[in-house]
Structure formats: C-alpha cells, structure tokens
C-alpha cells in the first residue's frame, strides 16, 4: 500500500501561502505513531507545493494528497 502524506494548502494573506500536514515525532519516548502538526509557508503556491512534495519523498512517502 502506498504511503501517502495528506496536506492542505491555503492563501493566508495576499501572496502568502501555507501548507499544513502531519509532522512525525522522533525519539525513544514518543508513542508509536505520534504526530505533531507541521507547516510550510512561502510566497507562491507552487513553491509550497514543490517543497512539501520533495520533503515527503525524502521521508519515504510515495505522494502527497492535497485536500
């Protein structure tokens, strides 16, 4: 089964875009499956999309599903 990162994107101000997605917690004391909210902000929708999709691939996701 494909590992999919679920993310949302919105324009929070004119020319300022934000993607929200679940971040992964690292460390020995983290409960299995622990997640924290994470986000990326940039001045272009495309820059945010590319950054999140490249980050997802580096973390082992096969794709990003945008909602």
Image (spheres, rainbow, N blue to C red):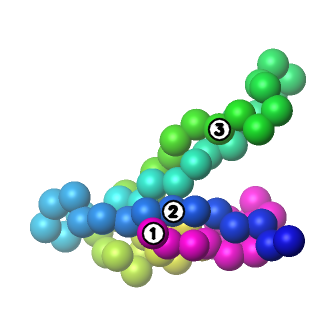
The first of marks 2 and 1 along the sequence is 2
Residue 7: give its label: 2
Disc 2 to disc 1: CB gap under 8 Å: yes
Q: Which residue ends up furthest to the front in the rendered image?
A: 1
Q: Secondary structure at mark 3?
A: strand
Question: Where does the magenta region start and end?
Answer: 54-67
The first of marks 3 and 2 along the sequence is 2
3 vs 1, front mark: 1
| Image spot of residue 22 (x, y percent) | 58, 48
In the rendered view, tell whether residue 46 sits above or below residue 36.
below
Residue 67: give its label: 1
- Measured in 3D between alpha carbons, the distance from the residue under mark 3 to the one under mark 1, in whole angstroms, is 19 Å
- Measured in 3D between alpha carbons, the distance from the residue under mark 2 to the one under mark 1, in whole angstroms, is 6 Å
At horizontal 38% and vertical 65% (from top left) the residue drawn is 9
| Image spot of residue 65 (x, y percent) | 57, 73
In the rendered view, tell whether residue 29 sits above or below residue 26.
above
Q: Label 3: which residue?
A: 35
């Amino acid at each position: 089964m494909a590992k999919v990162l679920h993310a949302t994107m919105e324009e929070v101000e004119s020319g300022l875009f934000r993607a929200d997605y679940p971040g992964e917690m690292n460390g020995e004391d983290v409960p299995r499956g622990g997640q924290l909210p994470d986000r990326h902000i940039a001045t272009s929708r495309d820059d945010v999309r590319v950054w999140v999709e490249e980050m997802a691939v580096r973390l082992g996701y096969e794709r990003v599903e945008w909602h």
